[in-house]
Amino acid sequence: MERYNNHVIVIYVLIALLAAWTFYDLVTTEDEVWTCSNVICSSVAGPEEWTRQNCFDAATEQSVQTVCRVQVDGVPRIVPLADLNLSGVQVCSQYSCVQEVRVREVNYPVNASSN
């Protein structure tokens, strides 16, 4: 009979541990979210794809020419395609997340000089 009681006690202890672990997991992850923290480029676009995404035909009084949206020193510009050297253009067209971290939303003041 005592052997039976020992088994029952072990089962109760395991159930209590499982319940405590489940409760802890629910409490600690209630306001946490997984988010990507590290990405890599998994697909590179060459000049043709870059041109399709960033260039368009624009009509002038004399003709229609292809122009492209670019940034020069951080300033958006429209530049004729003929003025651009696209031979070495490689732009990442698709990124893959390779690492995630668990985050939780908070709201408290931070001293900017401590970083």
Image: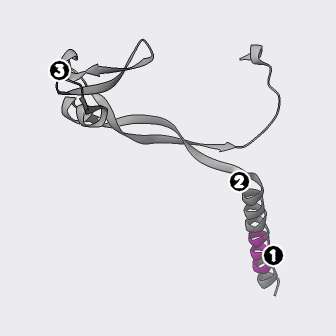
Q: Is residue 13 magenta?
A: yes
Q: What residue span does the magenta drawing correspond to?
A: 7-15
SS under mark 3: loop
Mark 1 vs mark 3, foreground winner is 3
Q: Is residue 100 left or right of residue 114?
A: left
Residue 34 image position (x, y, % from top left): 59, 48
Kindly identify which residue carries mark 1: 9
Q: In percent of the image, x 75 and y 79: which residue is there?
A: 7
Say above or below: 79 vs 52.
Answer: above
Give the prevailing secondary structure in the magenta stretch. helix
Q: Is residue 47 above or below residue 83?
A: below
Residue 95 on the magenta span: no
Label 3 sits on what residue type?
Ser
Asked which quadrant contains residue 80, the reply is: top left
Q: What residue is shown with label 2?
A: 29
Which residue was labeled with disc 3? 87
Whole-number angstrom distance, CA of label 1 to CA of label 3: 74 Å
